[in-house]
Structure formats: C-alpha cells, structure tokens
Amino acid sequence: MNPIDDVVLHGDLPSLDKPILVVMLQGWIDAAGSAHEAMNAIESQIAPLPIASFDSDVFIDFRARRPTMEIRDGRNSNIEWPSIDLYSGHDRNGRDVLILTGFEPDSAWHRFSAAVRELCVRLDVSMMIGLGAYPFPTPHTRPSNLSCTTPSVELLNKHAFVRTSVDVPAGMAAVLEQVLHDAGIPAISLWAQVPQYIPAMTFPAAAVALLDGLKDTAGLVFDRGSLQQEAVIQSERLDRLVAKNPEHREMVEKLEQAYDALVPRPPSSEPSDDAMTEKDIPTPEELTAELEAFLRDANPDLP
C-alpha cells in the first residue's frame, strides 16, 4: 500500500526550497490554547496554499469529533467536517514553510505518520517543529519558558531549552518526531509553560514564546506584535486580580522566587544575600495546593 493512498493531493506537489514543517494538531496537551493561538498567527501570515488533505474517514472518529451542522432559520444549510490538512507558505523573510493543522488522528497512527513521512520526503522537508503548551507552576510575571522533546542529541545540545525525564502518554507530534528522525529529517517539539492558575483563560505570552522558539530553532520569522500586545493586556489584568488578595500575591511571589532560582544566572552575576536556596523553593505539592485555590477564590473576575 502506498503511504499517500490515504491523502488527497490538491494538484501537483510544489517545488519548495528545504521547507520547515510546523505541526500543531488539536486534541493533545495545549494549555490555554497557546499552541493553537501561535499556529493561527502563523496561518494568518503565510498566505497558505492547500497541498494535501488526509482522509478523514480513515483518521477521524466522527462520534468523538462530530461535524458541525450549520442551522439557519431551521434549515440545515451546511455540514462542516473536521479535517487534517497540509498547507504551504512563506515566513516574513520568504522562507518556505509547511504547516500541518487540524485534529490529531483518532486511529491508524502508523498509516498517518507514514503518509506524513512520505510527503516530507517528496517535498524535501529540512526540519519538523511541533508546537504545544502545558500547565506548570510558573508565574505570569516572568517570560514563558520553553521545553523540548526530540530524538536528536544534536538538537538537544544545540538549543538551551528546558529538559526533563518522565514517562508520559505520547501525542502524534512525538510519533512524527521519531518517524521523521528515522527518515533523516531533524525533528523537535517546543512546549511552552503556562501558569497553572489560569486554565480557563488564554495566555498569549506562551504563544509569543512559541513564535520566538521557531525563530531560535529554525530561523522562521513571524509577526508577533498583536500577540505581544494581548500578552501585555492579559498580564496587567492578572496583576490587578492578584493584587486584590494578599494570599494570591504571596503565592505569585513564591512562584517568582522559584522561577528566578532555577533560571541560569549570567556567569558574572553573584547571588544576593536574600537569594533563594534550593531548600527554600516550594515543592510542587505545596505550589499545586495554592494554585488550585487561586481561581476558585477569584472566579467572579474571570470571563
């Protein structure tokens, strides 16, 4: 079976110059919708041209992701089907970009990843970058850190992203990392840390961090101005929310201290007398208990 038998091509495959593939498939971990927001910003800027659509009858469970029926004055005027699509475009510097968007496949993951691999080989993809975001005990008053996952030791050594060691369920982006790496295509996923106490709100600062990560990792440049403005507004709103309650202020201060203690210092800097030592950093259990109370107490101010 040809791997792209499950793919509908929209004409001949274009001739691209070592494009970068950016992947963001909905359905896996994306705290505050930050990765989706970053991908929307990318899609709005690249003038996307459709390359391929993946067979939704094969890859999507319509009972889990039901199509949307548009009702207009009682008339069923349209059915909008969930899909997985590949588009091409250019960043602000004219660099060829591919974006894989839509829903994470519900089934046939081996067939899906094989089809993506085949398309990447045919399109001469030079690198894959996945986007994601996860909740973390971090303050909204500090930049959103990025962590990464990749099978490539070379990429790990090249980029100073946060690293961890843990066994967790895998998303399709992780599968694509392995499959493309095995095909000789460098692959990495970037994960933005989102403050654990704002799960019901957007957090544009994390989307900004992901766009910055694309620039640092692959030299892709996208306009982040509007997202940055939204991040400033959101931060000011959270500041006002926190200021109303001394316990919330104390909780955010603890998160700030923990963040500052873990962020690498410049070689020339010396710790101050009141610098936090490792034993002073609150444990994840202590922070989580305070984080869970944060929005519960402040809920009337949330949308």
Image (cartoon, grey):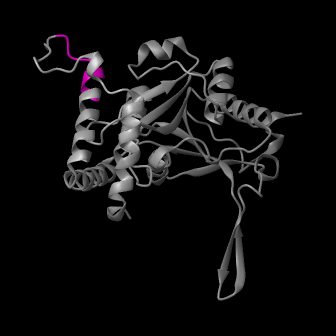
Image point (65%, 33%), residue name: 123
Image point (42%, 15%), residue name: 158
Closer to the camera in the image, 69 or 196: 196
Q: In this rendering, would 269 be left or right of 118?
A: left
Q: In this rendering, would 24 be left or right of 7?
A: left
Q: In this rendering, would 267 be left or right of 183?
A: left
Closer to the camera in the image, 46 or 293: 293
Q: Is residue 262 magenta?
A: yes
Task: Provide residue 79's location: percent of width, then percent of height.
Answer: 72, 70
Closer to the camera in the image, 20 or 303: 303
Task: Provide residue 294's location: percent of width, then percent of height.
Answer: 35, 49
Task: Provide residue 5's location: percent of width, then percent of height.
Answer: 83, 41
Q: Is residue 94 above or below residue 72?
A: above
Residue farthest left in this picture: 273
Q: Is residue 296 above or below residue 21?
A: below
Image point (78%, 42%), residue name: 107
